[in-house]
Image (cartoon, grey):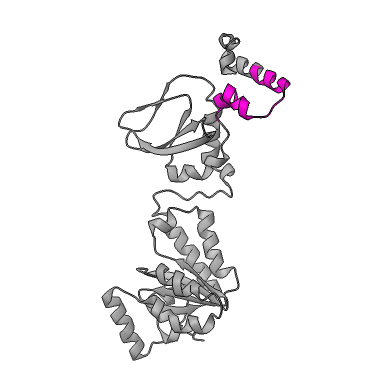
Amino acid sequence: MKRKGWRGESRRHSLARKGIGTVQPNESIREAIERFQAEGNYNYWEQLYPTVMDHVEHYQNDFLVHDKKLLEGVDEFVMGIRETGTDTFIMDYREDFYEARTLEEILALTGWVTGGRNDKFFWGKDGVITEITMEEAEKLMKERVKENEKLRKVPFTQFPSATDSEIFREAKNEIEDRRNYGMREEKVEPKKFYTRLFWSNSDASWHSRTEHFTDKVAKLDANEILLPYRAEEVNDILDELPPLPLYVYSHEGMKRTLMTEDERKQLKKEWVGLQGEQFRDKEELL
């Protein structure tokens, strides 16, 4: 049984390999497609307009505004449509689209297309649009996500939450070791990108910046840690990280934290145990 194509347009050169049947386009549509391809401007939005506007009765601005801009310069996409709007997933590898999202977020976007109430699905590639089933749309998107993963500059984070990630655990361990004042040195790989996290007492939070080094040693202050990841990967976990221990034990930190006198004494005892007897009488630190 032949599958109904998008207005009879054919994608036989690649659809057949995926088991998706199509019908032959008529001559006028074939000419239009060839013109779009020759111009390098596929006019997907214009091709979709009649059918989408006939099918979508509410929230048409999803298509008229958002999708019109989204489809500019795109080679391949999958779109789901329903009475109350559209959902579109870009299949091209685009740095602004893929690098800014984790794997969980990317897959969630594919779920918007196939997991909601959309009842028609279309695949656009090389200027041609074909109507496909929901199952075919899901398969195409997931296959492309795997392919695009290899093109990412920053690998996908495949953990369900920030606190489950390897980056979080590594950062937390480094932070817990920062219990002594003074500068220190750490070995690094020259020209490799790192993220320097530094604690600010003024707003009681971590901040980050990307760095790379020409030497094999990096100098770090007591409120800094260095992670072998790009800032794009680290920034997602900043709000989940514990505070710098030196801040927790500091006079400023205790002033901002409501605690009883017994809790203050216990904190001072822990501090002395960590730092040594030389700090026992230095009240300015407590």
Q: Is residue 66 above or below residue 130?
A: above
Question: Secondary structure of the magenta portion, mostly?
Answer: helix
On the image, the x and y values in percent for residue 48 come to: 43, 80
Identify the residue at horizontal 64%, vertical 17% (top origin): 268
- Indicate the position of residue 273 as horizontal and vertical percent values: 62, 15
* Nearest to the observer: residue 3 or residue 228: 228
Residue 178, image x and y in percent? Answer: 52, 25
32 vs 74: above or below? below
The C terminus lies in which quarter of the figure? top right
**Residue 165, visible in the rendered structure:** yes
Q: Can residue 21 be found in the magenta stretch? A: no
| Closest to the observer, 219 or 256 | 256
Camera sees residue 250? no
Q: Quadrant of residue 231?
A: top left
Q: Which segment is the magenta one?
A: 244-268
In the image, residue 255 lies in the stretch drawn in magenta = yes
Position in image of residue 180 (x %, y %): 52, 20
- Residue at 59% x, 27% y is 253
Name the residue furthest bottom. 27
Say if 103 sits above or below 30 in the image: above
Left or right of residue 79: residue 11: left
Residue 187 located left or right of residue 270: left
Q: Residue at x 34, y 90 (%)?
A: 28
How many numbered discs, if any? Answer: 0
Would residue 6 appear left or right of 279 to someone viewing this image? Answer: left
* 90 or 269, nearer to the observer: 269
